Image (cartoon, rainbow, N blue to C red):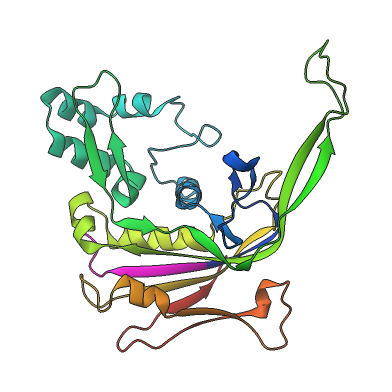
Amino acid sequence: MGTLSNKIDFAVVLSVKNANPNGDPLNGNRPRETYEGLGEISDVCIKRKIRNRLLDMGQPIFVQSDDRRVDGFKSLRERADACTELKKAETAKDKDAFAKAACTAWMDVRSFGQVFAFKGSDVSVGVRGPVSVHPAFSIEPIDAVSIQITKSVNSVTGDKKSSDTMGMKHRVPFGVYTFFGSISCQLAEKTGFTDEDAELIHQALRSLFENDSSAARPDGSMEVYKVIWWKHNCKTGQYSSAKVHRSLNVLPRDGGDPRDVTGYAVTADALDGLQPEIEDGI
């Protein structure tokens, strides 16, 4: 199985309706915003969702969240120590063999990269992955709404706080967000990332919010509207990623409902020899 044969650029257009897409812990968990008022979803948050979808597809994932782990390991160190080839490379202090073993064992490592630097280990290894993901930003400024909520019962017996203790909950009434990414053939050769891996990433993007519901993001409140997939005809790419990403247009339709994602038209400017696939989310 060969490594990735063509450079890939991609974009995702998604909608948020009465949900908190990514709370900011430094701002009372309010939806993230830029200084210009645009909504933001961090690249770390997006990669977490991609990992979760790959895990749902049965792919081996190194960075599993506690609420989604499937192998019983309680830390990254435990998961790494359970990999025989990784332990052999660590004992031999062979960083190249360590990186190769990690990329072979886990898809997210060969996709996004990973830093292996555990306390007490004599080996510190950094793997640079071929898949890069940008933060998502809303097309227009968002108007976050905050409401007060109350508890109906004390957490513990004898708690001095009454059962009507106040709290806050935040949501974005409506927003259309876009994020971009790319997959590098040169870095894919180093990690062993294949065309089949790229297709799994593609499918994960189309179903990004499946099995992702929570109190902050109820089922149906976040939707992948369109996935745009540019496959170049060579390893280095026919155009720079910046130029490809800039060719995407997400604009309100004439007469469309501005509070519904279908009220936005998604098109891509023509680039000679590079035709994007524009698909609906699942």
* Magenta stretch bounds: 1-12
Q: Does 61 sit above or below residue 186?
A: above
Whether residue 8 appears in magenta in the rendering, the answer is yes
Q: Is residue 128 one of those drawn in magenta?
A: no
Between residues 84 and 169, which one lies in front from this camera angle? 169
User: Quadrant of the image for the C terminus?
Assistant: bottom right
* Residue drawn at x 33%, y 83% as measured from the top left: 274
- Do we see residue 103 in this rendering? yes
Task: Identify the image quadrant of the N terminus.
Answer: bottom left
Viewed as shown, does residue 239 lie left or right of 66?
left
- Is residue 168 toward the left or the right of residue 91 in the image? right
Residue 1 in view (yes/no): no
Classify residue 263 by image quadrant. Answer: bottom right
* Image location of residue 277, percent across then percent down: 43, 78
Q: Is residue 253 above or below residue 179?
A: below
Image quadrant where residue 181 sits: bottom left
Question: Horizontal and vertical percent for residue 63?
Answer: 41, 38
Residue 104, by quadrant, is top left
Q: Residue at x 43, y 63 (%)?
A: 202
Q: Nearer the viewer, residue 223 or 257?
A: 257
Number of callouts: 0
Seen from this angle, which residue lies furthest front?
35
Measured as percent of width and height from the top left, residue 161 is found at: 83, 19
In the current view of this chain or complex, which residue is farthest to the top?
A: 158
Q: Residue at x 48, y 77 (%)?
A: 278
- Residue 68 in the image: above or below residue 220: above
- 185 sits to left or right of 24: left
Residue 226 in percent (x, y) is at: 54, 71
Q: Is residue 111 left or right of residue 54?
A: left
- Nearer to the camera, 74 or 112: 112
Query: In percent of the image, x 26 and y 18: which residue is there?
Result: 120
